[in-house]
Image (cartoon, helix red, strand yellow):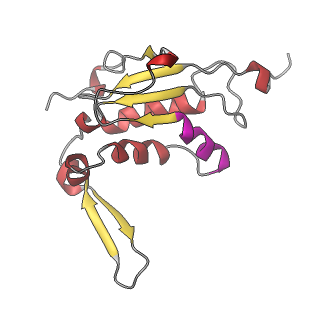
Amino acid sequence: MKTFTATPADIDKKWIIIDAEGIVLGRLASIVATRLRGKHKPTFTPHMDMGDNVIVINADKVQLTGKKRTDKNHYWHTGYPGGIKSRSAGQILDGAHPERLVTMAVKRMLPGNRLSRKQMTNLRVYAGAEHPHEAQSPEVLDVKSMNAKNTRSA
């Protein structure tokens, strides 16, 4: 039995849409990262971009468990002395760009190499329910029905 290695001709990319309303952030990011890498396919090859194009809508309605909405902080540095800044997860979700929380969660679940940076270009995250990708006729992936723990009521 020979080991199968995918070539660019073997790659079949689909478009998938995920509604993030009421879904726990970490579980959503894990599923999206798996789809972006292509690990859900039997022909997965680690060094090829096998993953699907993923559209996440309603990113502003994603849920966080426990007290993460108030206690989890995201830090960055401006580059100036004493320029450390932070924002809580709740402030990011209530702010102007709530989709960044989902994007960073997915990015941090991928390996830190050139291929994962290329795979991140296949992710589109939108805060609301509207998206401009109707022409690609994306398939709906129902994350809520995969596991009861994927959702959180409030």
User: Where residue 127 sits: x, y (%)?
Assistant: 30, 37
Q: Quadrant of residue 29?
A: top left
In the rendering, at what x and y percent does residue 139 appear? 46, 14
Q: Nearer the viewer, residue 87 or 145?
A: 87
Q: Residue furthest right?
A: 2
| Image quadrant occupied by the C terminus | top left
The N terminus sits in image quarter: top right
Between residues 74 and 122, which one lies in front from this camera angle?
A: 122
Q: Is residue 117 magenta?
A: yes
Q: Is residue 6 visible?
A: no
Total number of numbered discs in the rendering: 0
Residue 10 seen by the camera: yes
What residue lies at 44% left-to-right and 18% top-to-bottom?
Answer: 134
Residue at the location (42% across, 44% down)?
Answer: 103
**Is residue 109 toward the left or the right of residue 12 in the image?**
left
Check the image and name the residue furthest to the left: 154
Side (left or right) of 21 relative to 138: left
* Quarter assignment of residue 10: top right
**Which residue sits at x=49%, y=17%?**
135
- In the displayed structure, 28 sits above or below 140; it is below
**Residue 33 horizontal/vertical position (percent):** 50, 35
Where does residue 64 sit, x and y in percent of width and height?
Answer: 24, 41
In the depicted structure, whether residue 90 falls above or below residue 137: below
In terms of image quadrants, where is residue 133?
A: top left
**Which range of residues does the magenta coloring cover?**
113-122
Inspect the magenta stretch and tell me whether residue 79 lies in it: no
**Main SS, magenta residues:** helix
Could you tell whether 41 is left or right of 72 in the image?
A: right
